[in-house]
Image: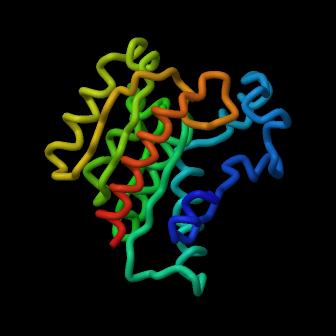
Amino acid sequence: GKRLAEEGYSVLVVNPFYRQRKAPTAANGAATPIPEVLPLMQALTATTNTTDARAFITWLDARPEVDTSKKIGTIGYCMGGPIVMRTAAAVPDRVGAGGSFHGGGLVTQNPDSPHLLIPQMKAQFLIAVAENDDMREPNTKNVLKEAFEPANLQAEIEVYPAAHGWCPPDTQVYDMAQAERAWSRMLAMFERALA
């Protein structure tokens, strides 16, 4: 959030688990065992993501420091990837760009799979896929590309030579070079799409 603010953007950093726990939600940051935060993650639904997206954007648009003549960008890491896609679909006239970094669950077999929302979106996307996520689900990138194409939306979908979780600096798999590369791609997209 601080880095985006330094770039001149008004920023809202969201605690997606606010219904269950005040921040910080992971006592030891990235070192917090996944089973400890899994119940928080499982409590989120497509409905709560969509409801929250609308509420957060309404709140942002009421802020004097937010230029409502410009589009909004949204980014998410890991489980935040689906939230980004649902946000872009929930408020398509406001969201101009979305970035997913090693996002999980972007393509599922469920009827509420985030990729099925692409026709409702008007945003450009950067989807930075982790190499080991791609090995586990090699067809996800193809499904996403096929879904974005008929929607006529610009989408940069790329597998990065880095492990899931490579972007946050407090993870064991942090890859500074690839994280900075993804960050610079996102900033370039924001510059184009949020003007």
Of residue 94 and residue 190, the one placed in the foreground of this image is: 190
Q: Quadrant of residue 30?
A: top right
Q: Is residue 21 left or right of residue 187?
A: right
Residue 12, percent from left and from top? 62, 64
Q: Quadrant of residue 168?
A: top right
Q: Residue furthest bottom?
A: 64
The residue at 28%/42% (across/down) is 156
Q: Is residue 1 left or right of residue 99?
A: right
The residue at 22%/50% (across/down) is 154
Q: Is residue 147 left or right of residue 117?
A: left
Q: Residue furthest top?
A: 135
Of residue 143 and residue 172, the one placed in the foreground of this image is: 172
The residue at 41%/48% (across/down) is 184
Looking at the figure, which quarter contains the C terminus?
bottom left
Residue 31, percent from left and from top? 77, 26
The residue at 23%/35% (across/down) is 145
Residue 121, percent from left and from top? 31, 56
Vertical placement of residue 76 versus 174, above or below: below
